[in-house]
Image (tube, rainbow, N blue to C red):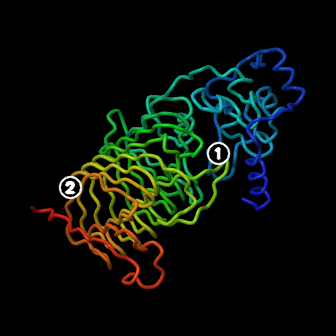
Amino acid sequence: MTSKFLILLLLKDAVCYKHDEYTSYFKKQMENNNQCVLDEVPDENSTCWNFNAIGQGSPLQKGCDNEACSEAVCGCDPYCCEMSWDLACRGYDKGLDHEKDNPFEEGCSAQLLCCLKETLPEAECSSGLKYFTSGLDTMDEIKICSNTVFVLEDNFTGVIPHRNITIKCGDEGLSSDNCTFVGGEYQFLFDSELKINVKFEGIYFENSTGAGIAAWGPPESSVSFTDCHWKNHIGYDAVDILYQTRLSRRLKQWPRSLQNTSSSQFSMSTYFEDCSFSHNRPDIGVILNVGGKLTMKNCHFHSNIASGVTIGISQEGFLNMTDCNFLNNKNYFSTIFLDQTSLLETFDLRGQENGGLVCNDLFQEASNSQCLEATKSLENSCNGTCIQFANIST
């Protein structure tokens, strides 16, 4: 992807969601009070109902296979034919705060102009990434076909859920049905502008280079994971919980740290049950929670090597853990770190053979300590209590 193309994308992303001026073509449709302009509706397999996912590599779809539909949409939003037929061109779903169509050119979407029905016939399960991402905008539940592996490109920057939805492996949402997302810089990304609740059941997340889950949504959003598993991530963390603002078509690169003063409000809530994290080698931590509520039940962490901590909680974050085990995790600082502003709501943890320079198990920072600000000597500026896990075998 050329630098010129990237600049054009960013310029397009920077436009406001509301516009006072429209093309003459679009004005005509508004005056008719009937935005469906086609004599014949594209069939259900038309590429007009597809869209380029955020982070999708070249070649990108430009326009669609129905000439009349393509001309109608691109007549009021040339971006859709000149740069990328993205979700705005296809049309957001009704459930979104910023309407169901095109937030960059109101009313200018295939869903409205090309007469997309409210629901199209759905496959029983999804085994292709394009169908899967399309379903995020239209379905309440997506079933991934058993033994499906979604291989994401190295520069893939995240599937973004747009509405309340359940994403499950097979009919029962069990990891034994083997549904896996592999690779990508980010695998799933929660947009700060969308207040949604998402559930994952029985999914494997492997080998991301940034974060498997970028939980960047507002405090009104939540995500839950049941029987999900993270392996072999090598980015800054496997799960990143930090509220931060950005435009839907843009992905900003943020410096990662437990000490992040840019967050001005609490982060979204995350819930994990019967999940595991193994053989991850993150630059900061396996799970980083800055200002969010993290709840974990019957989860297992083993054989992770973290340059910081296995779990880090800071900036008034909450940690609720019940019946979780930690085995053979190696950390620079400690297995779990809570800064002085954060709260440990319950504590029922077991562990063995974990290591850290300051504390092998759970370190709770003392008030007036400066663990996150320490640059040279932790001994002089970082104080707190090291809490030992109960033995796994007892």
> Which residue shows up at 42% across the image and 53% down it?
205
Residue 370, placed above or below residue 143: below
Looking at the image, is mark 1 or mark 2 earlier in the sequence? Answer: 1
Residue 389, placed above or below residue 90: below
Q: Secondary structure at mark 2?
A: strand
Q: Quadrant of residue 381?
A: bottom left
Residue 33, placed above or below residue 374: above
Specify the label residue 89 is tagged with.
none
Residue position marked by numbered label 2 in the rendering? 348
Mark 1 residue type: Ser
Mark 2 residue type: Asp
Front residue of 312/72: it is 312
Residue 276, placed above or below residue 351: above
Front residue of 14/40: it is 14
The local crowd at label 2, few if under 14, some if 14 to 19, many if 20 or more residues have their Cα within 10 Å, is some
Residue position marked by numbered label 1 in the rendering? 248
Residue 136 coordinates in the image, percent (x, y): 53, 36
> Which residue shows up at 74% across the image and 57% down it?
6
Image side of residue 140 versus residue 50, left or right = left
Residue 362 coordinates in the image, percent (x, y): 28, 67
Residue 368 coordinates in the image, percent (x, y): 40, 71
Q: Secondary structure at mark 1?
A: loop
In which quadrant of the rendered image does the C terminus lie? bottom left
Asked whether the viewer can see residue 40, the reply is yes
Image side of residue 206 versus residue 355, left or right = right
Q: Quadrant of residue 367?
A: bottom left
Residue 55 coordinates in the image, percent (x, y): 62, 51
In which quadrant of the rendered image does the N terminus lie? bottom right
Image side of residue 198 versus residue 253, left or right = left
**Is label 1 or label 2 in front?**
2
